[in-house]
């Protein structure tokens, strides 16, 4: 948190970049980082690359033991469209804001569109934890960190202070 790259809109992935060795290497680096940090997802700006690329899901993270499964997704140049107005407050954390959690309102149902690493279209309508993870990760591509979305700062703080001697709630 505080890195200027995390506070700006990331560059779009251009057609000639899809399927390239550079893009595939970036995805592998992101995946390795996400798994090593037990994250539910990660965005390219989080590892210092200004590209509209995020990956999420695909494995059971110990940080989210009760979360529903989210399919492994590589999402480039995303467009998010809320499905309805229903919002849900829930706890979130972030690899870019280590050791902290906060309650963040998110749309409960969402359509996301974009393409995969080869430029093939992706168009999904999702809800629950899947919708939350997609919104959180895509926020990174537009210069938004989850604390910017918190409405009640009394529900934001250090994980070990908020949840002493226990596992924190799912992010």
Image: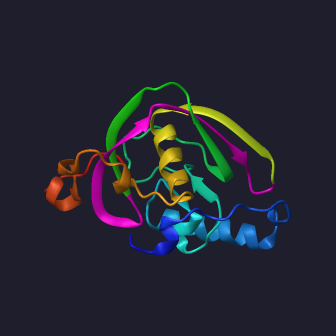
Compare residues 110 and 27 and report the one nearer the observer: 110
The extreme right residue here reads 16
x, y percent for residue 113: 68, 41
x, y percent for residue 38: 44, 60
User: In this rendering, would 20 be left or right of 44?
Assistant: right
User: In this rendering, would 1 be left or right of 79?
Assistant: left
Residue at 28% in and 51% down = 102
Q: Quadrant of the N terminus?
A: bottom left
Q: Height in image: 2 above or below 9?
A: below
User: In this rendering, would 137 be left or right of 63?
Assistant: right
Q: Is residue 85 magenta?
A: no
Q: Quadrant of residue 93?
A: bottom left
Residue at 37% in and 49% down = 149
- Residue 85 visible at all: yes
- Residue 63 visible at all: no
Compare residues 146 and 65 and report the one nearer the observer: 146
x, y percent for residue 59: 52, 51
Q: Is residue 104 magenta?
A: yes
Residue at 51% in and 53% down = 139
Colouring: rainbow
Magenta segment boundaries in residue numbering: 94-118
Total number of numbered labels? 0
x, y percent for residue 71: 59, 43
Q: Height in image: 38 above or below 149?
A: below
Which is the main secondary structure of the residues drawn in magenta?
A: strand
Q: Height in image: 36 above or below 55?
A: below
Residue at 81% in and 66% down = 17
């Amino acid at each position: 948190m505080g890195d200027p790259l995390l506070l700006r809109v990331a560059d779009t992935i251009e057609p000639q970049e899809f399927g390239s060795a550079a893009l595939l290497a970036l995805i592998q680096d992101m995946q390795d980082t996400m798994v090593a940090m037990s994250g539910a997802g990660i965005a390219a700006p989080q590892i210092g690359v200004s590209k509209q690329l995020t990956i999420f899901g695909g494995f059971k993270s110990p940080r989210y033991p009760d979360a529903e499964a989210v399919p492994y997704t590589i999402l480039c140049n995303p467009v998010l469209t809320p499905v309805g107005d229903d919002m849900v407050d829930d706890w979130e954390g972030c690899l870019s804001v280590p050791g902290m959690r906060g309650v963040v309102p998110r749309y409960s149902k969402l359509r996301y569109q974009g393409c995969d690493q080869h430029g093939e279209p992706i168009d999904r309508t999702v809800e629950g934890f899947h919708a939350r993870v997609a919104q959180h990760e895509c926020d990174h591509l537009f210069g938004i960190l989850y604390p910017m979305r918190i409405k009640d700062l009394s529900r934001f703080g250090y994980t070990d202070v908020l949840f002493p001697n226990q596992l924190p709630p799912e992010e």
